[in-house]
């Protein structure tokens, strides 16, 4: 039996799968990918993304990024805060805090300003701490052409 190809979806916060949520940052446009749901493609305009199912996406930008226990994210994400209780395989940049819960697995490259890893949480790959005076080193920073250095911009 040949597996069916998964649809390539492009979702925005105006899609029916979103809802507003009250949290410590006020009202944010929230997209929840529920358990048992898989999407592949781009997600735009979601201020808070909660992954309970499976998401494969190129670049996600959100204020808050949460991978719930059992959730899987493959791709690249930039967020102010990130919480990982499921699995992320790819690149994650948290300009504020990154929390890896006891059931969380971060595989790949990550950069953050503050880091908390609970007992049992796993990080496999490259981790960089962002300081207020330093930009993250590549590969999370925009790549320059081979003949151009940061000083020659």
Image (spheres, grey):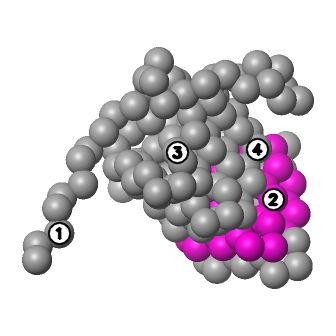
Tag 2: Cα neighbours inside 10 Å, few (<14), some, or many (≥20)? many
Residue bearing the label numbered 1? 3
The relative height of residue 73 versus residue 66 in the rendered view (above or below) is below
Question: Which circle, 4 or 3, is nearer the viewer?
Answer: 3
Do residues under tags 2 and 4 come within 8 Å of each other at their CB atoms? yes
How far across and how far down the image is residue 32, in percent?
58, 40
The one of 138 and 52 positioned closer to us in this rendering: 52
Rendered residue at 70%/76% (across/down): 123
Q: Is residue 99 left or right of residue 3?
A: right
Per the rendered image, the range of residues in magenta is: 92-117
Quadrant location of residue 31? top right
Question: Which circle, 1 or 4, is nearer the viewer?
Answer: 1
Regarding mark 2 in the picture, which secondary structure is present there? strand
How far across and how far down the image is residue 118, in percent?
87, 71
- The numbered mark, 2 or 4, whose residue comes first in the sequence reads 4
Residue bearing the label numbered 2? 99
The one of 60 and 24 positioned closer to us in this rendering: 24
- The numbered mark, 4 or 3, whose residue comes first in the sequence reads 3
Rendered residue at 78%/65% (across/down): 100
Tag 4: Cα neighbours inside 10 Å, few (<14), some, or many (≥20)? many
Question: How far apart in space, not on screen, are marks 2 and 4 (Cα)?
Answer: 8 Å
Circle number at residue 33? 3
Q: Is residue 107 left or right of residue 149?
A: right
- The numbered mark, 2 or 1, whose residue comes first in the sequence reads 1
Do residues under tags 1 and 4 come within 8 Å of each other at their CB atoms? no
How far across and how far down the image is residue 153, in percent?
50, 36
Question: How far apart in space, not on screen, are marks 2 and 1 (Cα)?
Answer: 35 Å
Regarding mark 1 in the picture, which secondary structure is present there? loop
Residue bearing the label numbered 4? 81
Do residues under tags 3 and 2 come within 8 Å of each other at their CB atoms? no
Tag 3: Cα neighbours inside 10 Å, few (<14), some, or many (≥20)? many
């Amino acid at each position: 039996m040949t597996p069916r190809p998964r649809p390539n979806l492009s979702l925005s916060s105006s899609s029916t799968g979103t809802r507003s949520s009250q949290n410590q940052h006020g009202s944010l446009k929230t997209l929840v990918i529920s358990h048992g749901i898989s999407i592949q493609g781009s997600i735009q305009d979601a201020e808070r993304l909660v992954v309970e199912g499976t998401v494969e996406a190129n670049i996600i930008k959100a204020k808050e990024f949460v991978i719930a226990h059992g959730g899987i994210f493959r791709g690249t994400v930039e967020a102010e805060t990130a919480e990982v209780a499921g699995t992320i395989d790819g690149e994650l940049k948290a300009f504020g805090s990154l929390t890896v819960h006891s059931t969380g697995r971060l595989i790949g490259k990550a950069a953050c300003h503050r880091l908390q890893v609970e007992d049992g949480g796993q990080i496999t790959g490259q981790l960089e701490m962002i300081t207020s005076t330093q930009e993250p080193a590549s590969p999370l920073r925009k790549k320059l052409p081979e003949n151009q250095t940061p000083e020659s911009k």
